[in-house]
Image (cartoon, helix red, strand yellow):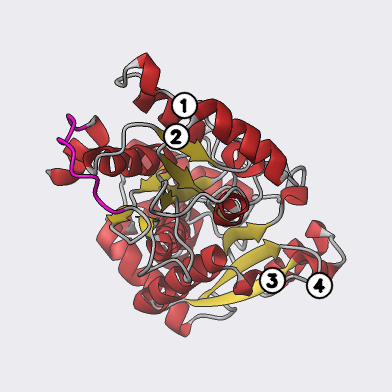
Amino acid sequence: MAEIAQQLGVASSTISRALRDDPRISSDLRSRVRTVADKLGYAPNPLVSALMANRRRRGGAGAVDVIALITNYGGREDWRKKDVCRWEYEGIQRRARELGFRIEVFALADYRGDMARLSATLRARAIRGVLLGFSREESAGIAFDCEGFCVGGLSAYFPDVIADRANFHGFFNVQLALDHMHRLGYRRPALIVPELNNRVSNNLWSGAFLDWQRKLPKRDRCEPFIPPENVTATEFSDWLYRNAPDSLLVYKMPVRTFLAKRGVRVPDDIGVAYLYRTSDEKGAAAGIDGNLDFVGAAALDLVVERLYANSTGTSEHPKEVLLKGTWYEGATLPPKNQPAPPRSRATAKAKR
């Protein structure tokens, strides 16, 4: 760095800022610094870069220790009351504390839905790290200008913004649950998820279910029940009658209420497991723990990674980090004491 400074006749601190694309350095000088650095084969030491970034956060001007969590949940419902959001947020907060950052929530509603106003506030406060999270479906179409920001995305929130993201491994989790259900002796499992949530998963839930069913005899295959909003008990009953499953893998549907209306008992008449159990279901019901706090932590890591690398703007080649869930036994799905089937790749990898 000193050699670059000597050739250009400027201070080493100026070279350091230029190499970090600091806007306080003119674009012309930044370009000349890059040219000389490339000729000299200069490459930053990532460990030193991380150390210096931490020192700058501790002692520099501006709120550089803050990472903005942008939300657009809308309406009167508070996202903090939802299990999924709360668990992810706990993971975000825990990881931020471990790395020495502070999370500050910026609700788009506080800016009357004007993302440009929100972005201007972040720039004025010198907040460069941004995590996009906790938005409702109507957030589709809402843009965030990533220029000058180190941006990461949580799950499928703000879906139209191109960014590195962390998410639960929907495909793996569905097949992991089905493997365990089959091992417990259930031979006609079926998937029940709302159409909206399946779409948010990029249809990985239904894709995993249909792929897993290929190993079953045709007589044991059930069609998934993926209804639109406001499904009725009658529609569910018609599907149940046509398919006659012996077990259900469920997400966010009042299945037990529907079954009770038909006089079908859980688990005496049919087994039930949950894809991402709620806090009420944990400890009592079988199913998947999505480890959503770790999903939140992984999303925060993506932002910090870009901050340390000073990588701003839209990700040219966005990546997605997928975290696997964990299966838990429960009283809603007792063993049927039948021989265990061959494992799928999902379970085989989990055992390694």
Between 76 and 41, the one nearer to me in the picture:
76
Q: CA distance from mark 1 to mark 3?
A: 44 Å
* Kind of residue at disc 4: Asp
Q: Are marks 1 and 2 in contact (CB under 8 Å)?
A: yes
Q: Please rate how many residues cluster around mark 2, counting C-alpha atoms within 10 Å: few if below 14, some from 14 to 19, many from 20.
A: many
Residue with the most extreme front position: 263
Determine which residue is flagged by label 2.
245
Q: Identify the element where label 3 is drawn.
A: strand
Which mark lies nearer to you, 1 or 3? 1
Label 3 CA crowd tier, 10 Å (few <14, some 14–19, many 20+): some
The residue carrying mark 3 is 106
* Residue 341 lies within the magenta run: yes
Task: Give me the disc on residue 122.
Answer: none
Mark 1 or 2: in front is: 2
Q: Which residue is mark 1?
A: 222
Q: CA distance from mark 2 to mark 3?
A: 45 Å
Q: Quadrant of the C terminus?
A: top left
Q: Residue at x 34, y 44 (%)?
A: 177
Name the kind of residue labelled 3 in the image.
Phe
Q: Secondary structure at mark 4?
A: helix
**Residue 82, horizontal then vertical, whole percent:** 59, 68
Can residue 227 be seen by looking at this rendering?
A: no
Q: Position of residue 309 (x, y in %)?
A: 41, 54
Answer yes or no: do the residues labelled 4 and 3 have beta carbons within 8 Å? yes
Q: Quadrant of residue 182?
A: top left
How far is disc 4 from disc 3 in space, using C-alphas?
Answer: 8 Å
